[in-house]
Amino acid sequence: MSQDLKDKTLDELERIVVDLGQKKYLAKYIFQFIHVENATEISQITPLSKAFREQLVQQDYTISHLTLTDKQTDSDGTAKYVFTLGDGHRIETVLLLDGKRRTLCVSTQAGCAMDCAFCATARIGFKANLTAGQIVDQVNVVERDALSVERKNDTRNTALPRGRLSADAQRISNIVYMGMGEPLANYNATIKSLAILNHPAGKNIGIRHITVSTCGLVPAIRKLAGEEIRPRLAVSLNAPTDALRSQLMPINARYPIAELMKAIRFYQDRTRQRVTFEYVMIKGLNDSTRHAKMLVKLLDGIQCNVNLIEHNPYPGCEFAGSSRERMTKFASVLESAGIETTVRFRMGRSIKAACGQLGADWLDESTID
Ligand code: SF4
């Protein structure tokens, strides 16, 4: 069976190279060419001898790549990329621009098994776990796309080396694991992808610039606290009481709020990092001043910030988003209690790239499946 070199950490590549009778340092070239130079073929890793490249091919090593099947851009600059996997399943990746910050929202699964009531991806159901290589490749492809756009727009016609990005301006600066799927339900691939993206010999994306979002898988949050590489943690909370949260998120029946909060405090004790809480605002359901006050009480003593996200509709969805007035009032209750709060309205909504909308474009087909 073929093995994907993109799916390997540098340590794993070193073992492969040594097992093939070659010098360990050559692994670094493979890693750099895949993750910095965006090489898509073994033949492009030119610092390796021709004989070694042939040996890798003969041993059935490959460099996988996602197939980009669609790209849509919103007037606010948000871009949504649709990829088709080898097994025919599709995933979506969203690029968000904010000044010099280029944030990529990556998927970790095709579909999702968590069944959150406000989320289009949940309606697709779980289809497949992505490999670490497929998670990382979302970054590679989007960066390559930025380069090709840049080349098209470059009227000076300056020849850039093949595959190399012209400037740091095109690089992804931040990654959020908030696309399709529950990252901590695909734990090993998520952890491995963090190691690859964070490595100084590769993309070198600082761990403080990487956020992993979870719906609240308590044992996995505790496990993550013991990892060598610990990203920023975001928790999709959405309700201040168990009754309401269980209505929106079935996972709450397994890991109720009190247990979740204990795990979050544990993570914070170990990492000393601020935690982000995401709170999708649904009209008439979780958006009153009373809910805001309960939330303040719940978050007491946790170093955190709260993202209030207007609920984004998708076909067949029973909920509507809260009004701006309601969201502003909710935010002011949190802020007056000293909780840093951001309010997100409709970013990427016209191309169904907003929170909770991924997969909405093909919902009808998928639910027929
Ligand atoms: S909100 Fe996240 S965890 Fe919940 S169903 Fe959607 S993708 Fe899955």
Image: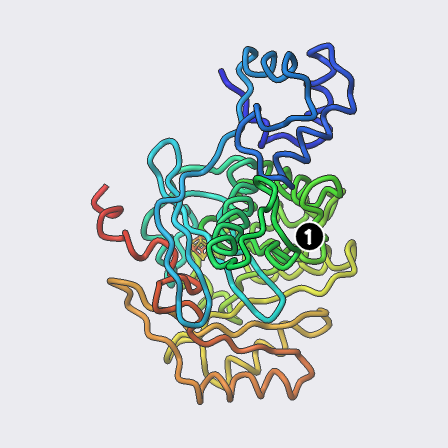
- Whether residue 121 is visible to the viewer of this picture, yes or no, is yes
State the residue lying farthest toward the front.
Answer: 156
Identified by mark 1, the residue type is Pro
- Under circle 1, the secondary element is loop
Toward which corner of the image does residue 170 lie, by quadrant? bottom right
Choose between 16 and 189: the one closer to the eye.
Answer: 16
Ligand 1 - quadrant of the structure image = bottom left
Residue at image point 73% right, 45% down: 229
Toward which corner of the image does residue 3 lie, by quadrant? top right
Q: Position of residue 285 (x, y in %)?
A: 39, 76
Q: Does 336 sit above or below residue 159?
A: below
In the rendered view, does 13 fall on the left or right side of 151?
right
Instruction: Give the position of the C terminus as an image quadrant.
Output: top left
In the rendered view, does 50 fall on the left or right side of 94?
right
Q: Position of residue 308 (x, y in %)?
A: 52, 74
Q: Position of residue 327 (x, y in %)?
A: 47, 83
Q: Position of residue 207 (x, y in %)?
A: 71, 52
Residue at image point 51% right, 59% down: 155
Toward which corner of the image does residue 164 lie, by quadrant? top right
Choose between 177 and 349: the one closer to the eye.
Answer: 349
Choose between 67 and 126: the one closer to the eye.
Answer: 67
* Marker count (numbered): 1
Residue at image point 71% right, 60% down: 265
Q: Does 99 sit above or below residue 65?
A: below
Q: Give the crowd class for mark 1: few <14, some 14-19, many >=20 residues within 10 Å.
A: many
The residue carrying mark 1 is 231
Residue at image point 55% right, 44% down: 140
Label 1 CB sits under 8 Å from any ligand 1 atom? no
- Whether residue 215 is visible to the viewer of this picture, yes or no, is no
User: What colour scheme does the image use?
Assistant: rainbow
